[in-house]
Amino acid sequence: MSYGFKIIAEGDYALFTIPSMKTERVSFDVPTVSALKGLIESVYWKPPICYVIDKIVVYNPIKFTNIRRNEVKSKIPLSAVKGQMKGTGSPVIYTSEERSQRSAMILKDVKYGIEFHFELTGLKSDKEDECEEKHYNIMLRRLTNGQFFRQPYFGCREFPVKRIELVEEFDLSQVDDSLKGDIDLGYMLYGLKFEDNGIPINGDWEHPIFSDKADAMYYRPHMIDGVIDVARYRGGIVC
């Protein structure tokens, strides 16, 4: 039995930030693998499974628009949150004082086909969680019913996915003519390789502490007639 899925995801806007352009954000022309994994994990995720993107289909022409966004420069310190739990500290940020306005070059009117499957990780699992069919049926039910535990989004939370549809096959006749041919997308961010491999560095799943240290992974895909065969180019990942 195959434990893979094909979905169509659409939205008004998307922002897949080029890492070297994070101050004034500029989007890649097409989605990054890590962004689509995050989208799928918004539907269903548990530590015992890991999603693998196999193919991306870009349906609509690549169009950009420039906007100005308000960003908060600071994060609430973890120590302030812990202090609030103990009755001390104040985990508050006043956005009027921490806000900065930045420009962003974003994609508009996006529609993507995403083919993916999941693999077992063995992390924080028991005999029940090691059953592939269980995870498959949960994901199938959620995709069929349009359910998710947090709003799926395209790169940034303010650009939500408007529609996710589970499909049997992708209709490649709907791919825009401007995307025909072999397009070299250059080096793109594939994902992050975390030093802890998803395992708490303190060995305690009840009160886990994870490492933030990670290396960026890049790959160089081609888009052929609107289709990015991620599995084909995965072997060329550089870190």
Image: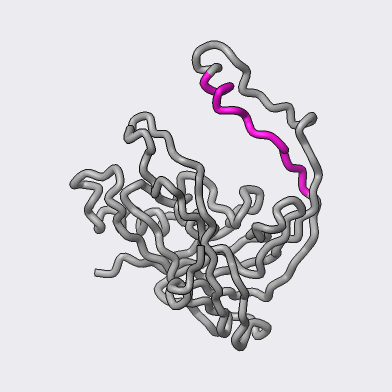
Q: Residue at x 62, y 74 (%)?
A: 186
Q: Residue furthest left?
A: 127
1 sits to left or right of 75: left
Q: Is residue 151 left or right of residue 158?
A: left
Please, is residue 199 above or below residue 160 in the view? above
Q: Position of residue 25 (x, y in %)?
A: 73, 55
Determine which quarter of the picture holds residue 185. bottom right
Residue 232 at x, y = what percent? 44, 78
Q: Is residue 225 above or below residue 91?
A: below
Residue 128 appears anywhere in the view: yes
76 in magenta: yes
Instruction: Count the marks.
Output: 0
Could you tell me which residue is drawn at 48 percent across and 69 percent down?
237
Look at the image and tell me whether residue 174 can be seen.
no
Question: Closest to the observer: 159 or 25?
Answer: 25
Here the colouring is one colour
In terms of depth relative to the viewer, which is nearer, 234 or 159? 234
Residue farthest to the bottom, as pictured? 181
Magenta stretch bounds: 69-82
Q: Report if residue 95 lies within the magenta region.
A: no
Q: Which residue occupies the foreground of this view, 8 or 182?
A: 182
The image position of residue 200, as x and y in percent, is 37, 38
Residue drawn at (50%, 67%), measured in percent from left and top?
238
